[in-house]
Amino acid sequence: YAPVVKRVMPAVVSIESKPKAARPKLDDIDPGFGSGVIIDPVGIVMTNNHIVAATNSVEVTLQDGRKFTSKEIRRDAKTD
């Protein structure tokens, strides 16, 4: 697995969502923090719905420490 992990690790990102309003915790899951994967070089990131469900924007942190903010958030609650 090590060669595969080494190859895909740069695509794994940390995500922090900026909530619209206070939101309840969901069964030990913090809906504002999580991880995602870059699925397109233009910056499209896939993550779990509960991380971005009630948010205005998200901050994405790359493996090298760079941070980006996005206000365009797409999600699919059915497949969370």
Image (cartoon, rainbow, N blue to C red):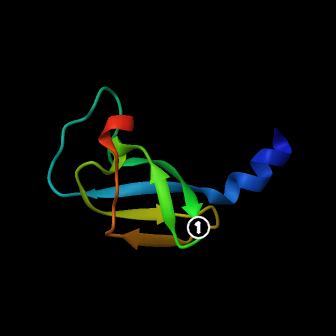
Give the residue drawn at x 69%, y 53%. Answer: 9
Characterize the local packing of mark 1: few (<14), some (14-19) or many (20 or more) Cα atoms within 10 angstroms.
Answer: few
Residue 60 lies, in percent from the top left, at 46, 63
- What residue is disc 1 on? 65
Of 42 and 62, nearer the camera is 42
Compared with 52, 18 (above or below) is below
Compared with 37, 24 (above or below) is above
Residue 59 lies, in percent from the top left, at 40, 64
Q: Amino acid at mark 1?
A: Gly
Number of numbered discs overlaid on the protein picture: 1
Residue pushed farthest top?
27
Give the residue drawn at x 25%, y 35%. Answer: 25
Residue 68 lies, in percent from the top left, at 46, 72
Give the quadrant of the C terminus. Answer: top left
Image-based side of 75 in relation to 11, left or right: left
Residue pushed farthest left?
21
Give the quadrant of the N terminus. Answer: top right
| Res 63 seen here | yes
Picture quadrant where residue 16 is located: bottom left
Residue 78 lies, in percent from the top left, at 32, 36
Label 1, secondary structure: give it: loop
Image-based side of 18 in relation to 5, left or right: left
Give the residue drawn at x 71%, y 53%. Answer: 8
Compared with 78, 38 (above or below) is below
| Res 80 seen here | no
Give the residue drawn at x 56%, y 59%. Answer: 38
Image-based side of 63 in relation to 1, left or right: left
